[in-house]
Image (cartoon, rainbow, N blue to C red):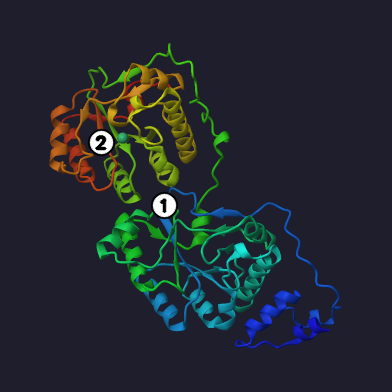
Amino acid sequence: MNGLLICRVRWIAKGLFIVLLISIVTGCGIFSGEKNEQEPTTATPVIERYSGPMSKVMPYVYTAKKEFSLTFNGMSDNVTMTKLLDELDKYGIKATFFLPGMRVAEEPDIAKLILARGHEVENNTLNRLDMSNLSYEQIYKEIRLSNEIIERETGVAPRYIRTRSGDYTDDVRLASAHNGMDAVIVYSLFLHNWQKETDLEKELYIRKYITRGGIISIDAEENTSLLEDVVLVAKAAEEVGYDFIPLGQLIKHGGERKPLEQIEGYDAVRINPDYENSKYNLIYDVMTDEKKITLTFDDWGTDYTVTKILDILAKYDVKVTFFLRAKGAEANPNLARAMIEEGHDVANHTYTHPVITTLTPEQLQEDVVKAHQVITEAIQQKPTMLFRPPTGEIDDKSAKIVSAIGLPNIALYNVTTLDWNSDNSAEDIVNKIMEKTDKGSVILLHMLDDIHTIEALPTVLESLRKSGFTFVKMAELVGLQE
Ligand SMILES: [Zn+2]
């Protein structure tokens, strides 16, 4: 029979593509060996859509550790791949290579070399086809055959699958699970070919996407500045102080996140139309005889900025309260979680950062409730129950509206330095703080990118300490009962 004859073909590298295509069509495994030849060649078993749970999808890994992964899609020619491996060695980077099974079959030595140099090899599907155009059976086989080739040639069984573009469908997730794989991997940054960016623009762009638990993807076949990009990524990682580790290790270090509904206090802030009689406290500072003060940081920033703030605070052993723009935390929850793991408090500064007095009661409540939920899920615990209005703008009505949903304590401030304006130098920031801070002060700073707060912070902490002040978190300063 035809199928039997085809199964008998002894493949060679050049003819492999045809053999594989035929074997996909006939359903006869190309690596089935002698045993298969004895089997009757009756109807090819049809691959039914998997009925178990889909593989999970990972665009990044849940972790607050200062580490992330560099991954490559596809396999370029021998010369390019060897240069790439040399470049990675130069920076001590261990990466993860998603290889197409077909290319591994053609040039198995490259795959072996990748492993020998300490990197990981995973599955980029057999031919890197657009999965959205394939039947379930075709998708299943694109994954399975690629797994078989990679394992046969390298001895390593892939655990993760990624398509050429990183896009996936439910069928890809099902076929991944069907093949016993651990996850469908996406990316937190796909580094495409540059257009006309200057070197500085490239650096700043990449810096923005260096995140804890991040998965950076570069296409080794299509990217025209592969080596340059490795240098850029390595430099950006060094600047923020994060380590590259292979994806398998990153995933192992990461954790499972509890869904929102399983976190205690997730519903402590709820829509409540009945706000007319709500009571609230506007807190600017605290009356106290002790030289206690609190530092607060508003808004959101990149890992580059926020990690620098966290590192300085750790160095001086000062704990603060972060008021988050929740939309930022939603996109990068690991950074919000890092604040908690370093012992700081995290609180609500709205989701979209509107001037709250301009919103309808419904809009305002929706925004702040959403912020509560996003922050709760990001930090995996109930946030500190303080609310700070963007720009400090608040009136009696909006205070009642926010209080009614479960946030009666409005966290304002009495020391502001306008540090959010990059025209204000580090010296300006230090001077304003030293001039205005008194017992019980609440100091407002920002964690925005490209302002001078980081520069000012060490001097601020040293000078305040020298003046006899001690730092507590805002909830403690105001005696908030949790
Ligand atoms: Zn703000």
Tell me where residue 295 sits by quadrant. top left
Q: Specify the amino acid type for callout 2.
A: Leu
> Which residue corresponds to mark 1?
212
Q: Residue at x 49, y 19 (%)?
A: 273
Residue drawn at x 29%, y 57% is: 204
Question: What kind of residue is marked 1?
Answer: Arg
Spot occupied by residue 338 in the image (x, y as percentages of width and height) = 40, 44
User: Ligand 1 lies in which image quarter?
Assistant: top left
Task: Please state which of residues 97 and 75 is positioned toward the viewer in this rendering.
Answer: 75
**Residue drawn where x is 41% and y is 29% of the image:** 384
Give left or right: position of 371 versus 36.
Answer: left
Dot 1 falls on a residue whose secondary structure is loop
Q: Is residue 182 left or right of residue 137?
A: left
**Relative to 360, does residue 229 appear above or below in the rendering?**
below
**Residue 219 position in % (x across, y down):** 46, 69
According to the picture, the residue beneath numbered tag 2 turns out to be 445
Relative horizontal placement of residue 15, taking residue 306 as reference (left or right): right
User: Which quarter of the figure is the C terminus placed in?
Assistant: top left
Of residue 83 and residue 470, the one placed in the foreground of this image is 83
Above or below: residue 285 compared with residue 20: above
Question: Which element carries disc 2, helix, strand or loop?
Answer: strand
Q: Is residue 73 above or below residue 285?
A: below
